């Protein structure tokens, strides 16, 4: 018998396909990985590249060319987040009614064009306008891709897929630094500075990726019309999720916001996720400006190249940690212990940077270790998706609401705790980070207790739903889940169970 890729033992050993999963289901999951992850990852990688390009451009000539002195970099960051905040929840509401395979790619083309416009700005005010519209049009990228990604996979599959998706963020940050170094060689070509060429090249990368989404990206399972999935695969995609407790889309109604804001995960994870997302902040801009101002202040071409390259170290190590903790948390069957480990390291590193009067080697370690902790903290997204499995619309809007908190803090904190004029010491910023680091560890038991309480009391475990999948091109869902699902997965295992009535 020849080698069978879908049944190979290595995929089972690393947990990509659970041992009990049938070959038919493995074929489906493999298709989903290509249809969803390829576009979602490339799209978010390009978005991160475009958004972060301004920071590499800032230390590569933009500062002096546009006279961005004082806190102007903070204001440029703020106007970007204002645009993102405004469109956050409306974007995910649109996603429930507009096909994702068109909505996200159209927005990608738009933010690509505003990125191109950034290359030709003449002053600070024009740059502010470009940054605002990059923020508005790029909003659907991360939050909508996350919503789609977390609508197709079982709980045991979510951690690893979310980690693969997360890795595109640090890859985009890293590639931005490398790309800026390459663009410095174009300085003067066509009468444009090297940093302007960075935005042009980013646009050339971004626009073609949108076509991948149009041709390959699916919608949510209950509204999927993908040409790449057979009717049987669309049916299997839904039945396996129903067995896992994931509800299909029921559409928007007037009660949606009541359901969203009455659900405890909306509020608890709004706080917890944003604590974890903000506490490693020093691994980004503060680390870059420490390298630029303290370590290599001469600003020679060699220094600029070194700063751009070293600034990618934290992002690189976060890729390794994201994959390790994703496999670990899926194997363990929970997310909280990985978050506890990350929280302890974050607290220790922020204390070191608050002290500040330590050797440069110790500071470098602290900055890089904070980058390492950016990996496991994305597991909070998988945790939200699992806890809100019973309501797809609530899950989508809650994810947007939680992410809106991140955007608000990303707007406010650089203008208060992390002002550019305080670089590289950032005394107020490190006091803030130490306090938040302690608070996030104290908060971990709260969602853990509430989740276990709900399971013990049977909340959301005995609901029934009429399933209508006409949008997927099916007449009905088969009443039996044949050998596509193992017997152990068909049993009620304490999770949410929906019964398809046909």
Image (cartoon, helix red, strand yellow):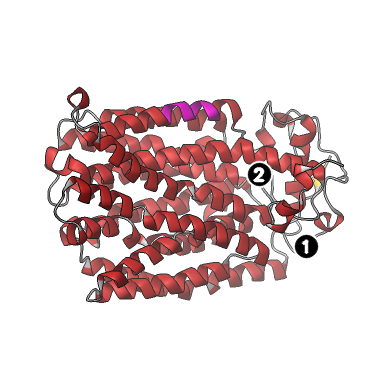
Residue 215 placement, left or right of 352: right
Q: Which residues are magenta?
A: 206-213
318 is higher (above) or lower (below) than 221: below
28 is higher (above) or lower (below) than 204: below
Is 211 contained in the magenta span? yes
Q: What residue is rendered at 37% in x and 51% in y?
A: 407
Location of the C terminus by quadrant is top right
Q: Where residue 386 sits: x, y (%)?
A: 63, 56
Is residue 239 at least partly visible in the picture?
no
Q: Where residue 126 sits: x, y (%)?
A: 19, 32
Q: Where residue 235 sits: x, y (%)?
A: 77, 37
Q: What residue is rendered at 22% in x and 76% in y?
A: 357
Label 1 sits on a secondary structure element that is loop
Q: Which mark is residue 152?
A: 2
Location of the N terminus by quadrant is top right
Q: Where residue 44 sits: x, y (%)?
A: 46, 41
Structural crowding at the residue carrying mark 2, measured as other residues with C-alpha within 10 Å and reported as few (<14), some (14–19) or many (≥20): many
Q: Which mark is residue 493?
A: 1
Q: What residue is rendered at 20% in x and 66% in y?
A: 425
- Of labels 1 and 2, earlier in sequence is 2
């Amino acid at each position: 018998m020849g080698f069978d890729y879908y049944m190979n033992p290595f995929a089972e050993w690393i947990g990509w396909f659970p041992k009990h999963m049938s070959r038919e289901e493995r074929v489906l999951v493999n298709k989903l990985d290509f249809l969803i992850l390829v576009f979602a990852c490339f799209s978010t990688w390009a978005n991160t590249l475009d958004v972060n390009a301004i920071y590499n451009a800032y230390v590569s000539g933009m500062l002096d060319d546009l006279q961005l002195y004082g806190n102007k970099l903070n204001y440029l960051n703020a106007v970007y987040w204002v645009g993102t905040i405004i469109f956050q929840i409306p974007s995910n509401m649109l996603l429930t009614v507009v096909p994702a395979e068109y909505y996200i790619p159209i927005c990608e083309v738009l933010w690509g064009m505003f990125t191109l416009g950034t290359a030709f700005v003449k002053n600070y005010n024009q740059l502010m306008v470009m940054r605002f519209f990059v923020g508005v049009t790029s909003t659907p990228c991360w939050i909508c891709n996350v919503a789609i990604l977390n609508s197709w996979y079982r709980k045991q599959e979510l951690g690893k897929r979310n980690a693969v998706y997360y890795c595109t963020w640090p890859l985009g940050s890293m590639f931005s630094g490398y790309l800026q170094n390459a663009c410095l060689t174009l300085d003067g070509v066509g009468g444009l500075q090297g940093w302007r060429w960075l935005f042009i090249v980013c646009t050339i990368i971004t626009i073609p990726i949108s076509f991948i989404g149009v041709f390959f990206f699916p919608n949510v399972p209950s509204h999927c019309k993908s040409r790449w999935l057979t009717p049987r695969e669309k049916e299997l995609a839904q039945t396996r999720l129903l067995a896992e407790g994931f509800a299909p889309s029921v559409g928007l109604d007037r009660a949606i916001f009541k359901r969203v804001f009455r659900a405890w995960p909306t509020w608890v994870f709004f706080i917890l996720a944003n604590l974890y997302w903000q506490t490693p902040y020093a691994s980004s801009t503060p680390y870059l400006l420490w390298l630029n101002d303290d370590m290599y202040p001469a600003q020679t071409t060699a220094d600029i190249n070194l700063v751009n390259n070293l600034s990618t170290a934290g992002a690189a190590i976060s890729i390794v940690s994201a994959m390790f903790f994703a496999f670990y948390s899926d194997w363990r069957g929970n997310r909280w212990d990985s978050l506890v480990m990350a929280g302890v390291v974050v607290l220790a590193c922020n204390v070191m940077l608050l002290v500040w009067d330590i050797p440069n080697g110790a500071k470098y370690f602290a900055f890089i270790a904070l980058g390492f902790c950016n990996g496991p903290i994305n597991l909070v997204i998988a945790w939200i998706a699992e806890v809100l499995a019973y309501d797809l619309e609530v899950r989508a809007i809650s994810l947007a609401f939680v992410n809106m908190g991140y955007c608000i803090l990303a707007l406010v904190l650089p203008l208060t705790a992390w002002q550019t004029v305080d670089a590289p010491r950032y005394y107020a910023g490190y006091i803030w980070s130490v306090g938040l680091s302690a608070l996030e560890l104290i908060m971990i038991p709260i969602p853990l207790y509430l989740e276990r309480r709900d399971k013990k009391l049977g909340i959301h475990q005995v609901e029934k739903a009429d399933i209508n999948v006409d949008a997927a091109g099916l007449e009905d869902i088969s009443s039996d889940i044949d050998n596509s699902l193992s017997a152990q997965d068909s049993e009620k295992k304490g999770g949410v169970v929906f019964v398809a009535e046909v």
